[in-house]
Image: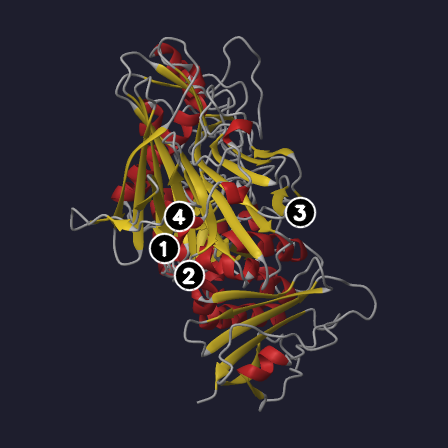
């Protein structure tokens, strides 16, 4: 750059407003920084805002201006763009972040810098807002960058405002538009289906576009979640490499585009899927897009995921720094076949086991069309008088008498065609009036774009809590996807049907806001036929989520491993069930990797199994704080080894719990050699003790085993997992 550097700092004008930008050669430079990282925006001669830098934070902020477009192989004449929010229909030749049809039918858009401000929310959180406007049409876009300094997390979204006199149509409206430069990029994304969630695929991005998307409407993550890892220059490992973890906070259709150009620059555009979702804005109306949340680390995937965990526990998951309830669920014990006598017997079993709560699952409601299977009754939320003649209030009291709390399952967004609700309000159902109904699990989706349906869904929860104030837990399920998308409400109110996919999710959030406004502390599990709906916008209202209906512990090792990159384990609901061929200890130890629950027939356990299960609940309650709030270190990846090994360490590094699970049953397999631990204090000495031994077995660890953190993180320790010891749990405690 030939121009002389002019670091002209502008003084603050309000107590809560700070200015982090400076002007260099008539260009405005806007650093958006966390403790370790920086994203830098910079205007050009045409007043367009581009991304000039992304990576490790520079010590001298004024040097961001020295990162020039020329050094990044950009050429305005070739259409190469580092735009912070790429418009469509003017100068851009690449995938846009926004496409608009103006009130007069014109489809071009230009966005020029108008202003920006940076507001210090508190000592850790800062919000930067950048305002862009079209010079020819009255359309305004604001870009928001909320940084969490210590956690090194950025939350990014946009708002689009129509100041034209007529209605405009948003054809695309992304949350975030990022631009990266690197030698190569490796994308890890996920695919799956029911009972087969979170299967990773890693591919090197080459020229062209790779898209992650969902068009399912409700159970949007069934085949693919809106979460990914992006490695820069080479594939990142747990401890090495540059990597970005990203996820979209949206419980509906999403699309994330990765576009690599001929110069190997990469653009990432994330937001609501515009498929069948053209969104009209009347004059003066504004649309806020969902949050795209990401963190960057140049020390590997492990540090990046710990960044995300710390942020999520403190700022996003409901009661993320609190505690969780252990529970006994009746589903695999009874399915739909139960009555009051069976259930009260299970309450006693829960108390004997030592759990905090009994959860009554599907099948407790509907009378004209009783809920005795999944083909009837959904939508009719009155207790079935044959199964529960004394109502839910009786069960709540009986559970309390037995010494456990009581929780219940609901699926309030859905309806069976064989239900009284469907007969009374067919106009409340999402379906095409001229086409045959198409069912998913024998059910259809209620139209939550309709305020009356929102009131109905809220009323289900409100009535449950009003009649049963001691109700202690909700499991909120969502099993169906949207077929034949059409809203009678939008049609009758003369609104565009293309708003349905977006307004459905907005309607869901309105319901959840009302629930949490009145019942802010009741724990709720987010379930969607397994992990079909797991995102950080939904988790604002839920304390935990159900990763998968597949509770085979071997499969769960792999699923929980991958989920743990994006979501802290305090939010993982893991149940001990009869799925799988592994011994009870293995099933239990795997479930302890998150929030422990049981879905077994306690009365059928033999003496040793019951003794072990009761002991396990006691053990879990002693280590749960480590699992819920500790830093997670992955030691041995199950996809690369014959075993999985991971470790939780508390904040002051005085205590840790270490899990090792065999994932191969081939002859002679085992850990074989020491596993190097992580996250400890090298100067401290730790006593090792094996936990959760099955009755009648002995530990291979001597009672006086103690080593320095330096030794354990350099030489390691062999937990001696093998085909006879398929799971090993070890506690490390500082020796004073």
Q: Is residue 331 left or right of residue 113?
A: right
Nearer to me, 626 or 203: 203
Residue at (39% x, 48% y) in the render: 65
Q: Which residue is mark 3?
A: 202
- Res. 61 mark: 1
Q: Residue furthest left?
A: 14
Image check: 134 left or right of 172?
left
CA distance for labels 4 and 2: 57 Å
Assess disc 2: are there few (<14), some (14-19) or many (≥20) residues with their C-alpha within 10 Å of its C-alpha. Answer: some
**Earlier sequence position, callout 1 versus callout 2:** 1
**Tags 1 and 4 touching, CB below 8 Å:** no
| Circle on res. 356 | 2
Determine whether the residue tagged by mark 4 lies in a helix, strand or loop: helix
Which numbered disc flags the more N-terminal residue, 3 or 4?
Answer: 4
Which label sits in the foreground, 4 or 2? 4
Q: CA distance from mark 1 to mark 4?
A: 8 Å
Q: Residue at x 57, y 27 (%)?
A: 442
């Amino acid at each position: 750059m030939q121009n002389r550097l002019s670091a002209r700092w502008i003084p603050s004008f309000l107590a809560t407003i700070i200015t982090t930008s400076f002007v260099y050669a008539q260009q405005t430079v806007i650093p958006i920084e966390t403790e370790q990282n920086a994203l830098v925006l910079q205007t050009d001669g045409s007043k367009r805002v581009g991304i000039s830098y992304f990576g490790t934070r520079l010590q001298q902020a004024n040097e961001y201006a020295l990162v020039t477009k020329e050094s990044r192989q950009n050429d305005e004449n070739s259409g190469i763009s580092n735009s912070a929010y790429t418009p469509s229909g003017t100068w851009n030749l690449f995938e846009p972040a926004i496409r608009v049809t103006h009130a007069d039918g014109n489809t071009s858009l230009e966005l020029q810098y108008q202003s920006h401000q940076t507001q210090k929310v508190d000592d850790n959180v800062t919000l930067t807002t950048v305002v862009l406007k079209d010079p020819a049409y009255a359309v305004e876009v604001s870009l928001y960058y909320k940084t969490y300094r210590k956690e090194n997390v950025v939350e990014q979204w946009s708002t689009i405002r129509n100041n034209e006199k007529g209605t405009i149509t948003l054809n695309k409206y992304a949350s975030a538009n990022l631009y990266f430069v690197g030698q190569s990029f490796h994308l890890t994304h996920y695919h799956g289906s029911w009972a087969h969630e979170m299967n990773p695929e890693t591919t090197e991005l080459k020229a062209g576009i790779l898209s992650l998307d969902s068009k399912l409407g409700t159970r949007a993550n069934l085949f693919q979640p809106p979460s990914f890892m992006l490695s820069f220059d080479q594939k990142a490992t747990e401890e090495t490499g540059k990597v970005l973890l990203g996820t979209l906070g949206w419980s509906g259709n999403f699309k994330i585009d990765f576009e690599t150009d001929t110069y190997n620059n990469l653009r990432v555009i994330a937001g609501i899927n515009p498929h069948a979702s053209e969104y009209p804005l009347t004059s003066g109306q504004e649309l806020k897009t969902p949050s795209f949340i990401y963190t960057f680390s140049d020390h590997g995937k492990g540090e990046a995921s710990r960044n995300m965990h710390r942020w999520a526990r403190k700022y996003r998951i409901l009661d993320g720094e609190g505690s969780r309830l252990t529970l006994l669920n009746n589903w695999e014990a009874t399915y739909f076949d139960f009555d009051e006598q069976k259930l009260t017997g299970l309450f006693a079993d829960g108390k004997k086991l030592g759990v905090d709560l009994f959860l009554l699952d599907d099948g407790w409601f509907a009378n004209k069309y009783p809920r005795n299977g999944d083909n009837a009754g959904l939508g009719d939320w009155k207790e079935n008088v044959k199964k529960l003649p004394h109502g839910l209030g009786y069960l709540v009291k009986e559970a309390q008498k037995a010494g456990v709390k009581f929780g219940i399952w609901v699926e309030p967004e859905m309806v069976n065609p064989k239900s009284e609700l469907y007969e009374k309000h067919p106009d409340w159902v999402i379906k095409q009036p001229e086409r045959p109904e198409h069912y998913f699990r024998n059910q259809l989706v209620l139209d939550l774009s309709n305020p009356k349906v929102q009131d109905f869904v809220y009323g289900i929860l409100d009535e449950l809590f009003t009649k049963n104030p001691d109700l202690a837990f909700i499991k909120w399920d969502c099993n169906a996807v949207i077929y034949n998308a059409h809203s009678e409400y939008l049609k009758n109110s003369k609104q565009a049907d293309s708003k349905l996919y977006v307004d459905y999710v907005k309607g869901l959030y309105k319901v959840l806001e009302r629930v949490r406004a009145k019942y802010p502390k009741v724990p709720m599990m987010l379930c969607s036929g397994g992990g079909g709906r797991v995102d950080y916008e939904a988790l604002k209202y839920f304390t935990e989520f159900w990763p998968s209906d597949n509770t085979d512990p071997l499969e769960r090792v792999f699923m929980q491993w991958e989920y743990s990159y994006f979501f802290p384990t305090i939010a993982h609901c893991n149940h001990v069930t009869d799925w799988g061929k592994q011994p009870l200890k293995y099933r239990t130890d795997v479930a302890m990797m998150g929030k422990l629950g049981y879905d077994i027939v306690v009365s059928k356990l033999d003496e040793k199994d019951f003794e072990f299960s009761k002991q396990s609940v006691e053990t879990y309650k002693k280590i749960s704080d480590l699992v819920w709030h500790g830093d997670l270190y992955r030691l041995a990846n199950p996809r690369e080894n014959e075993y999985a090994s991971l470790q939780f360490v508390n904040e002051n590094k005085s205590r840790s719990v270490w899990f090792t699970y065999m994932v191969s049953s081939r002859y002679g397999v085992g850990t074989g050699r020491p596993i190097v631990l992580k996250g400890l204090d090298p100067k401290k000495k730790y006593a090792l003790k094996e936990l959760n031994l099955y009755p009648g077995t002995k530990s291979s660890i001597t009672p006086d085993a103690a080593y320095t953190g330096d030794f354990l993180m350099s030489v390691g320790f062999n937990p001696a997992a093998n085909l006879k010891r398929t799971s090993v749990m070890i506690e490390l405690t500082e020796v004073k």
